[in-house]
Image (cartoon, rainbow, N blue to C red):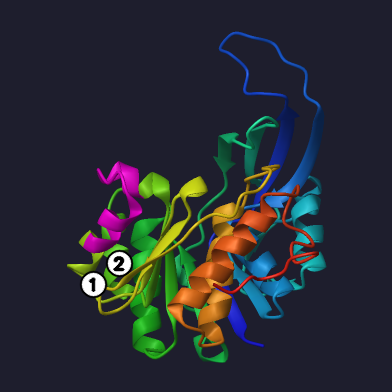
Amino acid sequence: MAKILAVGIATLDIVNVVPQYPDQDSEVRAIEQHKIRGGNATNTLSILSQLGHQCHWAGVLIHSPDSQVIIDNLSHHRINTDACWHKTTGIMPTSYITLAQDNGSRTIVHQRDCPEYDFEHFKQIDLNQFDWIHFEGRHIDETTRMLAHLKQQAPTLPCSIEIEKDRPGIHTLLPFADYLFFSKNYALSQGHQQASTLLTDIAQHYATPATCTWGSDGAWAIDHVGTQYHHPTPTILLNDTIGAGDTFNAAMIGQFIKQHSITQALAFATQLASHACQQTGLDNVLTDFTFKES
């Protein structure tokens, strides 16, 4: 069991399930609605907790009645919040998600009215107690300070960074990473129509193992010497794709901690993320999951 810290956000997700995505100016009745805890960093930790690791979250946690869903879920997954910036005023970030039942797609409208986690709180953490630290690629200036502090205080501590969106200046985070997790959306924003070309471009600048997920086409990885690997997405009936990328990242981290090969890590992560897409939410994601080695 490893002790893992993730730096990023938690959100309140209000999910409306509809038969198919509605046309503009149309009115549609939701099949169901549920409220769950979301957010990339905490999603990743919830999976790592289910994989048997001791998980800590560093983010902003506003204690209010509206955030009780988040607090209860963090407690359910035994995610420690001591490193959080605890506040009693404000509103937790909220995502209004339209989940299309016919193809599992999700469309998100995000509302945020709370501060981002900052370096002043991060520097108070005893980093040497952890075996791995994972960052969301967000709030770039403050995250850069956190990463520089990490490399100064604990230079041998493995660090992964999720690069999901093309935020201004996000490329400045890349040199700090020991492992990089890219999304399809980021690759497309950089003009890449294939995961493999993004990873080839990254390898020209950084000798850093990296992955890039590509939905139904599977996921790609590249090792520190530039060799690429691919694992296809299993044929499944999609139910809910929310958190699939976070599940993939968590599975990769879990496999790397166990010092498995990049090929096995890629296969395990792709299969677990696909399995998660067959259920609603990320609780009990290991139930009925069987890893099929290539």
Q: Position of residue 174 (x, y in %)?
A: 30, 66
Q: Position of residue 262 (x, y in %)?
A: 44, 77
Q: Earlier in the sequence, mark 2 or mark 1?
A: 2
Q: Is residue 234 above or below residue 204?
A: above
Quick check: 226 left or right of 45? left
Does residue 245 appear anywhere in the picture? yes
Does residue 121 appear anywhere in the picture? no
Q: Nearer the viewer, mark 2 or mark 1?
A: 1
Quick check: 142 left or right of 274? left
Whether the magenta-drawn stretch holds residue 110 is answered as: no
> 124 or 235: which is nearer to us?
235
- Label 1: few (<14), some or many (≥20) within 10 Å? some
- Where does label 1 land, which residue? 206
Q: Residue at x 72, y 15 (%)?
A: 28
Residue at the left extreme, as displayed: 204
Whether the magenta-drawn stretch holds residue 199 is answered as: yes
- Secondary structure under tag 1 reads loop
Tag count? 2
> 24 or 150: which is nearer to us?
24
Could you give the CA–CA distance between mark 2 and mark 1, rounded to whole angstroms? 8 Å
Q: Residue at x 41, y 89 (%)?
A: 154
- Where does label 2 land, which residue? 174
Q: Is residue 125 above or below residue 119?
A: below
Amino acid type of the residue that numbered disc 2 sits on in the rendered structure: Leu
> 27 or 122: which is nearer to us?
27
In the rendered image, which quarter is residue 172 located in? Answer: bottom left
- Secondary structure under tag 2 reads helix
Q: Are marks 2 and 1 in contact (CB under 8 Å)?
A: yes
**Magenta span dominant secondary structure:** helix
| Residue interval drawn in magenta | 187-200
Residue at the top extreme, as displayed: 25
- Label 2: few (<14), some or many (≥20) within 10 Å? many
